Image (cartoon, grey):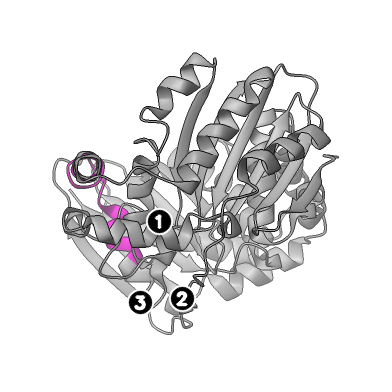
Amino acid sequence: MIHYTRTQLDNGLTVICHTDSNTPFVCVNTLYKVGARNESPDKTGFAHLFEHLMFGGSAHIPDFDWHVQQAGGDSNAYTTNDYTNYYITIPASNIETALWLESDRMLALNFSQHALDIQKQVVIEEYKQRYLNAPYGDVWLKLRPLAYKVHPYRWPTIGLSPEHIEKATLEDVKEFFYHYYAPNNAIISISGNISETKALELVKKWFGDIPPTPYTSPEIPQEPEQSEYRQLISKGNNVPSDALYKVYHMGKRLSEDFYCCDIISDLLSNGQSARLYQSLIKKQRQFSEIEAYVGGETDPGVFIFSGKISENTDIEKAEEAVLNEITSFIHDPITDREFEKIIHKIESRISFGEINYQNKASNLAYFEFLGNLELINHEKAQYEKITTRQLQETAQKMFCPENCSTLLYLK
């Protein structure tokens, strides 16, 4: 059980504090409620661009990383389709350095054409290196717009095109910053060797006078139910083998459907004793690797099958083998031993996630972002109450042809 305090400051900033005396460090985690889904279709990749810009200096701090390192700390960030997360781990005695750094860039990020040009080039090169030139790198550039037609999940966090970043102006990024990078659109969670009372006191000191933004994010269009099978055949450059990707729409993160789908994915592909490995790799040798997993998006997301086809195997036959496994899952009984093993694995994963102070800081911010902070202490129960009957009913409903989008990625 993780004990925490939750406070909302007058400027709208949500502050969550947790004491962990088993470490000499503290993690200051700052989550901004802005991700790729908050972008305009003609200006995508901005949330990810800001992940880079936020380390480019602020009004009183020209070199962010230098101060972190001088204080014995480390910092990083990541962007998802739903939110952007920044964190600093630092000796607890130096926590004010972390709060000073985070508050200064929230209040007054350094906007200069020079800094923008540098980070634009970094992001464009990342786009080329990871998405356009890497084997299978462009898969989600193809899959997302195949599966989504309305919701902004139809583009990845890197953006629809490098041209959107290339054309970004100083005014564009300023507008984006002042809309979303404000205390009333942020969550600060602190976990480590500091009392919850002292941590809150310091956050008030450094963030309490930062004004909120009056901007309200527009409502995000929801994806209509898919009613027809979709398929795309694509050829990739410099890929060693054909690959198969099948995605099915599923429920949002806080729905019971999510927990069912997460368990289904583990039953199918968590470890070498799982169904897909045993059948499609070990016995039939149709695939050299295959996995099933859930995206975990806040809004209704997707369940993904991803596999590399074995040499001299026909991709259509490999796809048929996957469909046979799906049919078998829906109709054949799930044994008690199989089910209990997966539930124990999930319980272990959650428990291990509660040990590290940095994980606890990020998880506290994440569950607050989802709108159910107390779920951090009760998510095990969400999994444990699922029955095998529910799993098969969920699979039967989800794994229907008209709910599927398939990418045949040929070498």
The residue lying at 35 percent from left, 62 percent from top is 175
Q: Quadrant of residue 59?
A: top left
**Residue 149, position in %: x, y?**
35, 77
Q: Nearer the viewer, residue 379 or 9?
A: 9
Mark nearer the N terminus (3 vs 1): 3
Residue 240, label in figure: none
- Residue 3 drawn above or below residue 317: above
Q: Is residue 380 above or below residue 216?
A: above
Q: Which residue position is annotated with label 2?
A: 403
Tags 3 and 2 touching, CB below 8 Å: no
Q: Amino acid at mark 1?
A: Phe
Secondary structure state at the residue bearing disc 2: helix
Q: Residue at x 70, y 58 (%)?
A: 10
Residue 305 in which image quadrant: bottom left
* Magenta-span inclusion, residue 142: yes
Q: CA distance from mark 1 to mark 2?
A: 37 Å
Res 222 seen here: yes
Earlier in the chain: of badge 1 and badge 2, it is 1
Q: Which mark is residue 177?
A: 1
Amino acid type assigned to the residue bearing label 2 in the image? Asn
**Mark 1 vs 2: CB contact within 8 A:** no
In screen coordinates, is 79 left or right of 90? Answer: left
Q: Secondary structure at mark 3?
A: loop
Mark 1 residue element: helix
Q: Which residues are magenta?
A: 120-144
